[in-house]
Amino acid sequence: MVKRSFVSGALILAAAGFVVRILGFIYRIYLSNLIGAEGMGLFQLISPVYSLVILTLTSGVSIAVSRMVAGEFAKGHYVNLRRITSCAAVMVLTAGIIVSLFILLEIDFITGVILKDKRTYYSMLLLIPGVPVIAAASALKGYFYGIQNVTPTAFSQITEQIVRIGIVMLLARYSVGLGLEYACALATVGMALGEISNLSVLFFIYKFKKGKMFSGITKRGFMRKREIVKNILKISVPVSSNRFIMSVMAAVEFILIPRMLEAGGLDYQESIELYGRLTGMAAPLIFFPSLVTSSLATTLVPAISEAMSLKNYRSANYRISKSMQITFILGFVFSAIFMSYPDEIGNILYKNQNVGWIIHLYSFTCVFIYLQQTMLGILNGLGKQGISLRNSMIGYLIRIGFVYFCVPVFGIKGYIWGVIISSACVCILDLITIMKVIGMYLDVRNWIVKPGFIGVALLICSKYVYSFFTIFSSNPKIIIVLTIGANLFIAALIAAATGLLPREDIIRLFNFRKYQNKLKI
C-alpha cells in the first residue's frame, strides 16, 4: 500500500487544491459576469443550507474512517480497512437518503421561511439528488486519507471541478434568459453532477485497487462489524454534532447579514448585491491560500492519530509544530499581499464590482482564519472534538453578535471586525488546549516573529515591486501576476535567510530514506 508523510500528502492535496481553486476562480468569474452581484448573492443564500446538510453528514464519517483506518493500518490490522470503509459507506448513504427526503418534504418551508426568497426553490430541488452521493464519497475519502494516499482524492477533486464548470458553460446560454432563479439552478446542477463524478472516480479507484491492496492479508486483529459501527458512531457523532451546531450558527450568521444590511438602510436588492460581493467574490479570494492549511488539516488527522496510537509523542509534536509554522508563514505573507494590492486584484478578477475595499478589510483575517483550520485538524487528530466545539461556538457567538449589533450601524465593516476578533479568540483558545494536551510550548520566534518579519518586509517593498513591473508592461493583469510572483519569491528568500525551514527539516518533511529511521514523520 502507498503511504506518504503527512506533509507530502498535504502538498499533493494542496497542488490539487490549487488546480481546483484556479478552475473555481475561472468558474466564479464567469458566473459573476453571467448573473451579476445579485445572482451571486442569491446563489450564496443556498450555501448555508448546503453546508449544514453536507458537513453534518460527511465530516464526522470522514474523520472517523480516517482515524480508524490510520490506527488499524499502523497496527498492521489490514483486514479491518475494507470493513471499516464499507460499514461507513452504508451508514452515511442511508443517512443521506433520509435527509434528502426530508428536504424534499420541507422545501417550501426552507425556501420561503428560512431563506425568504422563493427564487431559490429550483436550486434547492436540484441539490437533493447530490446529497446521498456526496455522503457516500466521504467514506471513501476517509479511507484514502487514513492510509495516507491522497492521490485518488486529489484526482477526484479536479474531475469534479472540470465537470462542474463544463456543465455550466455548456448550458448557460439556455438558462440566463429565463431569469436569475434558473441561472442559479443551473449552477446547482453543475455542483450536483460534479459531486457525482467525484464519487465515481473514487469508487472506480477503490474497486480497481481493492484486490491488489487486500490480497494475502491475515485476519490478525479482526473486528466484528458491530464493533466497527460502534466505533464509527463514537467518533463521528461528536464530530457531526459539532459540524451541525457550527453549520447552524454559520447559517444564522449568513442569513442575518442581508437582513441586517436592510436594517441599516439598504433596500433588498442592494443588500443582496453587497452580500454577493462579500461571500461570493471577496471571501473566496481571501480563502484561496487556505488550500494549503485545509490540506494540512486533512492529513494531520490520520498522521496525529497514528503517532498517538503508537505513543510516538515526539513525532506528533514535530508534525504539529511544523504545521503551525507553515500556517503562520502563509498567513502573514498573504495578509501582506491582500493589504498591498486589493484594488488591483479585485478589479482584474471582478470588473466594475468594487470589491477592493472588502478585500483590504478581509486581509486582516488571513492569519487567524488559516490558523483556525490547521488547529481544527490537530484537535480532531487528538480526539478533542468537544473542546473544539466549545471554542468554535464562542467564536460564532461573537460573530453573530457583531452581525446583529454592528452591521446595521457600520455595514460590512462591522461584520469583518467580528470575523477578526472571533477568529483571534478561537485561535487563542485552541492553542491553549493543544499546548495543555501534548505539552508543547509557544515557539514565538519561529511561529510569529520570523513570519511576521516576512509580512512587514513585503508591506514595505510592495509599492516598489509593483512600480518595477510597470516598466516592462502596461497590461494590469500581467503586472499584478508578476508582482504577486515576485512577492512570493521575496518571501521564500527571507524564509531561507532567517532559517525558518532548514535543509534538514525539508529532508525530514518529505520522509527521505536517510532520515526515515531517525524520525518518521
Image: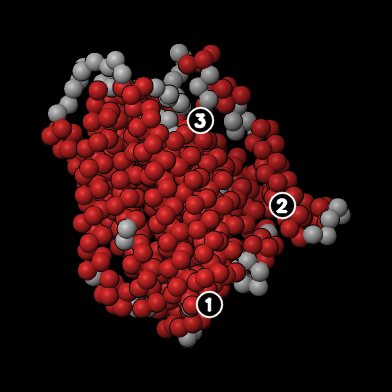
Within-10-Å neighbours for mark 3: few <14, some 14–19, many 20+: some
Picture layout, residue 314 above or below residue 131: above
Q: What residue type is labelled 3?
A: Ser
Q: Is residue 410 visible?
A: no
Residue picked out by circle 1: 177
Q: Is residue 270 left or right of residue 352?
A: left
Residue found at x 17% / y 26%: 223
The residues bearing labels 1 and 3 have C-alpha atoms spaced at a distance of 47 Å
Q: Are marks 1 and 2 in contact (CB under 8 Å)?
A: no
Query: Given this view, does label 1 or label 3 mark the residue nearer the observer?
Result: 1
Residue picked out by circle 3: 8
Residue found at x 33% / y 67%: 125
Residue picked out by circle 2: 481
Q: Which amino acid does label 2 sit on?
A: Val
Query: Given this view, does label 1 or label 2 mark the residue nearer the observer?
Result: 1
Name the secondary structure under disc 1: helix
